[in-house]
Amino acid sequence: MRTILRNAKIWLGGDQFASAVLFDSSQILAVGTDAQVEAQRQNGDQIIDVQGRLVLPGLCDTHLHCYNKGCTLQNIDLQDVSSIEEIVSRSRDYIQAHPDSSVIHGRGWNHDYFAEGRILNRADLDRISTRVPVVLTRACGHIACVNTCALQRLGFTGVIVQPEDGQIDVDEQGCPTGIFRENAMLLLKPLDPPLTVTQIKERLALALDAAARAGLTTVHSNDVTSENLDLMLEAYRQLRAEDRMPVRVVLQCTLTDPESLMRYLEIKEQTPSDEVLVFGPLKLLTDGSLGARTAWMRQPYADDPSTRGIATMTRAQLDELVSLAHAHGLQCVCHAIGDAAIEMVLDTFENVNRTSPDNPLRHGIVHCQITDSALIDRFASTHTAALVQPIFLHYDQHIVAQRVGTELAQTSYAFRSLAERGVAVSFGTDCPVEDLNPFANLYCAVTRKDLHHPEASGYRPEEAFSLEAALRCMTETAAWQSFEEGRKGVIQVGALPDFTICDQDVFTLAPQKLKDVRSWMTICQGKVRWQAE
């Protein structure tokens, strides 16, 4: 079916607008005034009067985790808790509502917000249950706390042998406190029964529906791993075949050994090209998070000189996987938050691109938080893309100087500086670390303020994006990041029929009001995927 949106304010870039657009399920057919598009109307065309609302190119999130988002929607949501007592109460309520659960999972806590002023421990979680394993993951996803039952099930009852690239916290007597950091969290996997494709599909579907409601039409989702490669790909394939993907997905795949990477390359080569389910880049993690003090730093943390964080890969491991992917023409994006991690990834990218310094595979770094001026220069000189999360400023602006010191804080989260140096900067949310609401992300990019204090001056306001530049990071540059420029992120003839229709006009709002905007209608693949009541 062909559809006409009319009586609209359709953003074409810059200060250019149209009032109507005609499209079918595969592409945009015409853009112009209501009269110009009406002249191409045919019998049977569907007409949608958007009543003067703003229509943007479909918004894209270039880094999140759909599967983990789906899990949070099924498990205990701890994102807004302000105390350990609240965690205990909310978790007990969940157990009462789900008495047959064999393992209790929750996510979203942040100990920096706790009234008690300390991190969780196993004794806190023992108050939730002594009968069932409880695993509560921090908002960042880089720390988990478990109860004594979980420790006993896993056999952590004697001397603790620390894993590589991770840490199990112990007390003065050498007993585990319940806190698992970075790759130590992999040791918790035996607590859960094996996943089925049906379970994975249900969780992915929940997340994709949430993305459509939020106004997203494309997500770059980091779900595939070496451990779940076949199951996750099969779940996505089935959702695609059942037309249960209301947004387009670019897969970011964490493949940590050459064998699984080669298998993914083989599957990718054998899979027909598809603009809804895109087999995207290799995605590697090189460190942790700033909030957890596991981001890998060159110097010790200012507020904990005993640690520089955790490098979750060695340079040799990183070089091997990136070189293998690069040799087979596969793009790489690497999680790097601390300055030591960013430097290591830039070294690796510079090495693989030594004969093609313009970075033709568009390798990029996800997060790019702690930088000095020299690292910013290296992003530009190596043409390394930056897949950043402005919404992290909501929380991180209150801790960054404490963690890394005032001097380094004044050159960090330098997203506008990167863009002005010619670096391709695109925006994501890292959901479920933060909510996938693209307008909250837009607000943080434009104001550099937290979501609760729009009256404040904000963190390094000189790094704020203009509204137009920020929107381009969520549309045109996001499309470039997945080699889809011209097809996505623009409203022009021949582009994909994806639109985010806003309930308020972002071009006429005061910047502090951007966080209150929502999707009035989301159209993806030429179909209405969400409409507000």
Image: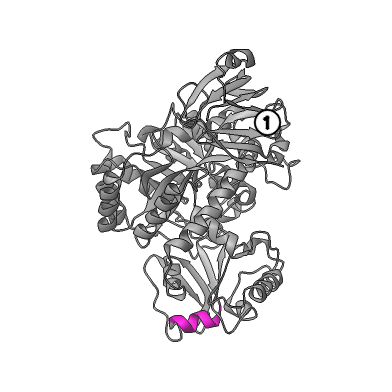
Looking at the image, which residue is at 42% across and 70% down? 194
Q: Residues within 10 Å of mark 1 (few under 14, many from 20)?
A: many
**Most frequent secondary structure within the magenta stretch:** helix
Is residue 142 rendered to the left or right of residue 267?
right
Image position of 8 with respect to 169: above or below: above
Residue at 53% x, 83% y is 149
Figure colour scheme: one colour
Image: 221 above or below 18: below
Residue 208 percent coordinates (x, y)? 53, 49
Question: Residue 44 appears at what percent x and percent y?
Answer: 57, 25
Q: Position of residue 122 (x, y in %)?
A: 57, 78
Element under disc 1 = loop
> Where on the picture, by quarter, is residue 107?
bottom right
Residue at 26% of width from left, 47% of height from top? Answer: 323
Q: Quick one: 332 or 461, which is closer to the camera?
A: 332
Query: What residue is disc 1 on?
Result: 506
Amino acid type at mark 1: Val
Q: Is residue 150 found inside the magenta-colored segment of the image?
A: yes
Location of the C terminus by quadrant is top right
Per the rendered image, the range of residues in magenta is 147-154
Q: Indicate the quadrant where residue 80 lies.
A: bottom right
Residue 350 in sight:
yes
Magenta stretch contains residue 145: no
99 lies above or below 450: below
Q: Is residue 17 left or right of residue 295?
A: right
Q: Point out the residue furthest to the bottom here.
A: 158
In this orientation, which residue lies closer to the viewer: 238 or 220? 238
